[in-house]
Amino acid sequence: MANPFDTYQPQQQGHSLWVTIPSKIISYLFHPLFIPTFIFIFLVYQFPVQFTDITPWKLKLKVFSVFWMTAFFPAFAVFLLWRLKLSESIYLRTQKERVIPYFVTMFFYWWMYYLSKNQTDQPEVLKFFYFGIFWSAIIGVIINNFIKISLHTIAAGSAAMAMILFSFFYHIHLGLPIVITLLLAGLIATARLFVSNHTPLEIYSGFGLGKPIYLIFL
């Protein structure tokens, strides 16, 4: 009997626009490159006391710098690869096309981790978060040699575990944010099943990447 994890191909199943359009919107809105920025913004609003040493203007610059380093530069690298004909599209549909973007993203995650260790005007948990997504990228590029693991669910799983880490680290109840993050993670996975060419194994395995890394801090 064939393994359904290996043979399932969502894009071949002609879903209606009522499913396809929302799934694409979710996929774009919660793109993996946006997750570090979302996490930083969450910390700004959830733990404002952690940012009292800087002015509101500098705080806005910090939010922008997180987006600039973790989203814009990796996305620009993908765009350059496409324009230089090193990849067939900006959507990175094959495992081979994902290798260089993995290493580019890995570099910027490491750089953010390095900066977070030397900055005292932001939450200490950011150091753990950047370290976690840096190692998720390392493991991801290794697994990419065998299956095209979903980048969306890697990011969603990392975000969910980061919320749990924040709750343990600050000894505060973050039940609602954790539930919302887990629900969004499930929504992202469902959307990718509908509008990507990932198999369920590639989708679900992404959730497992962030957990072992973050658990060492709990």
Image (cartoon, rainbow, N blue to C red):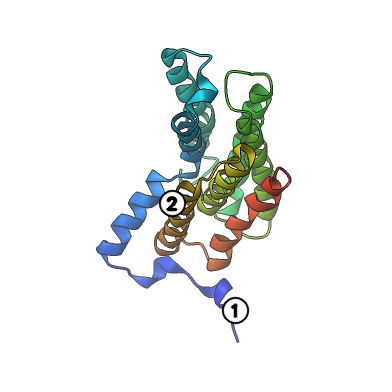
Q: Check residue 180 in the rendering and tell me which mark sits there, or answer none.
A: 2
Q: Quick check: 155 above or below 134? A: below
Residue appearing at x 46%, y 12% in the figure:
55
Q: Of the residues shown, which amino acid type is indicated by label 1?
A: Asn
Is residue 200 among what the camera can see? yes
Name the quarter where the N terminus is drawn.
bottom right
**Contact (CB < 8 A) between labels 1 and 2?**
no
* Mark 2 Cα shell of 10 Å, populated few (<14), some (14-19), many (≥20): few
Q: Residue furthest bottom?
A: 1
Q: Quick check: 198 above or below 173? A: below
Tell me where residue 66 appears, x and y as whole percent. 51, 27
Q: What's the CA distance linking mark 1 and mark 2? A: 32 Å
Residue appearing at x 50%, y 51% in the figure:
152
Q: Of the residues shown, which amino acid type is indicated by label 2?
A: Ile
Tell me where residue 88 appears, x and y as whole percent. 49, 46
Q: Check residue 3 in the rendering and tell me which mark sits there, or answer none.
A: 1
The residue tagged with tag 2: helix, strand or loop?
helix
Q: Residue furthest right?
A: 216
The residue tagged with tag 1: helix, strand or loop?
loop
Is residue 148 among what the camera can see? no
Tag in front: 1 or 2 = 2
Q: Earlier in the sequence, mark 1 or mark 2?
A: 1
Tell me where residue 186 appears, x and y as whole percent. 46, 59
Q: Check residue 69 in the rendering and tell me which mark sits there, or answer none.
A: none
Nearest the viewer among 63 and 111 is: 63
Residue appearing at x 43%, y 62% in the figure:
190
Nearest the viewer among 101 and 31 is: 31
